[in-house]
Image (cartoon, grey):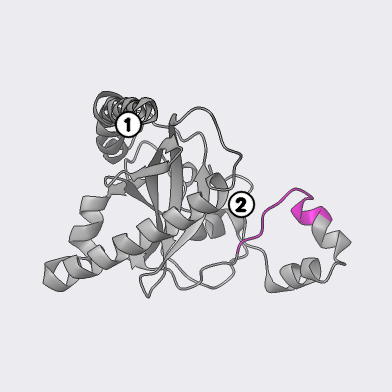
Amino acid sequence: DGHGVRRASGEEVRALAAGGGKMVARRLGTELVVQRYVDDPLLWDGKKFDLRLYVLVASMQPLRLYLYRQGYARLAPMNYTTAHGKNRTLDRKVHITNRSQHNKKTGRCAKTLDDLQKALFDGVAGRKAWKVLWGRIEELLRRSFLAVLGSMPRLEERLCGKVYGVDVIIDAQQWPHLLEVNRAPAIDSGIGCPEIREVHEPLARDILEVLLPGHAAAATADSAAAARRRVG
């Protein structure tokens, strides 16, 4: 939710990388993840944003993933700048895009991907650029999940049905960068942000009523066919 996230200075990172920096480690904490900061993000109305997308792992053997096409964009409350502010609270509202940085009563914490395409990827050239970007996102997530789930021990259960929330940021050259994979994403009513509800309600319905039953039926048919081949 954005709590515990902050921008470390270059001096702090160099001190940690050098293996010294005990004082820095105490200040930052001992259990932390350091990511390279994307300092040239694609901006929307002058604001930094990231994408919350959803991936369904429907099967482990074989590894089968589905990327839901209707995610949403989360915008930072304040216009982007690379300058370090003295007010840490305001600094977070420039660089952190999580819903926790917004007043939920305003309904401005997120926009749908349709809104994003209309604003930044409109027209023939824009639609072509969006298609290229989406392909890059698919490849990024395919490689990310394969690196982790593909290396797990073989499981007896073929079906999975696990939904992950993935956060992706896009740089100014329209290349995606993976920020986080959330193993327990909130698929809620999007209190104070109707755009989130527009995504979550059909997402839940499609997974429960269409995708999983269809995949289960296909997997059952594959198993029956394989059994017949073994008998024959």
Q: Nearer the viewer, residue 25 or 71?
A: 71
Residue type marked 2? Val
Would you say residue 78 is visible in this rendering?
Answer: no
- Point out which mark residue 222 bears: 1
Left or right, 136 with reference to 94: left
Helix, strand or loop at disc 1? Answer: helix
List x then y, in percent, for residue 213. 28, 24
Residue type marked 1? Asp
List x then y, in percent, for residue 25. 81, 57
As displayed, is residue 99 above or below residue 86?
Answer: above
Residue 33: in magenta span:
yes
What residue span does the magenta drawing correspond to? Answer: 26-35
Q: Nearer the viewer, residue 213 or 28?
A: 213
For the point 25% across and 36% down, the residue is: 198
As displayed, is residue 124 above or below residue 210?
Answer: below
For the point 32% across and 31% down, the residue is: 222
Would you say residue 98 is visible in this rendering?
Answer: yes
**Circle nearer the N terminus (2, 1):** 2
Q: Indicate the quadrant containing the C terminus: top left, top right, bottom left or bottom right.
A: top left
Q: Nearer the viewer, residue 32 or 78?
A: 32
Look at mark 2 in the image and give the residue it sits on. 5
